[in-house]
Image (tube, rainbow, N blue to C red):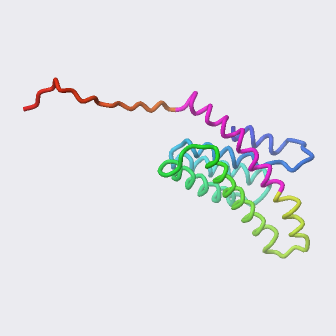
Amino acid sequence: MLVVSYIFMTTAPLRLRTPLFVIPIAMCISMFEEPFDSAVTGCVAGLLLDTAQGTLIGLSGIILLWCCLISSLLFHFFMRRHIFNIIMLNAAAVLGQGLIHYFFYYAIWEYDLSGKIFTNEFIPVMIYTEIAVIPFFFIVRFLVKKFGVIVESYIEEKSDDIVRE
């Protein structure tokens, strides 16, 4: 899914701003995976995002590594795997990645039109990326249920027939 979204992001001739499909896919995958696997997924997704955007290699990799790791830990220990939870965590990841990207590429150098770039480029991309998490959640959940690891649990029943001395 990451490779297909990367190909779409780099070759799609859309008139609108192209959403960063790699972020919601990585966040949805991290929702169902173990922390180490989700950290690796976030790093790979960040590197794909950096090459798709033509930015410094590694910045988005580090950001998405931590976002996916924290997301996986939250879903592993505290949160339920529900669509509203992934929408909120994806919004935090998209906002964090977008603001860090904007700060290091535009705001720190005090470009004259940096505010216009933020409102015309970054905000629409963030909104489209946030909307894209909804179909990806259902696709990833279906794939995990269909092809994921089956976890079996056994419940031992109490029996009065067993005599212990």
Residue 108 horizontal side relative to residue 73, left or right: right
Q: Is residue 135 above or below residue 95?
A: above
Residue drawn at the location 75% of the way across and 60% of the way down: 98
Q: Residue furthest left?
A: 165
Whether the magenta-drawn stretch holds residue 131 is answered as yes
Residue drawn at the location 64% of the way across and 36% of the way down: 140
Magenta span: helix, strand or loop, mainly? helix
Q: In front here: 68 or 87?
A: 87
Residue drawn at the location 62% of the way across and 52% of the way down: 43
Q: Quadrant of the N terminus?
A: top right
Q: Is residue 90 above or below residue 145?
A: below
- Magenta residues (range): 124-148
Q: Is residue 52 above or below residue 98?
A: above
Residue 74 horizontal side relative to residue 97, left or right: left
Q: Residue furthest right?
A: 15
Whether the magenta-drawn stretch holds residue 45 is answered as no
Q: Residue 30, position in %: x, y?
A: 58, 46
Q: Residue 112, position in %: x, y?
A: 91, 74
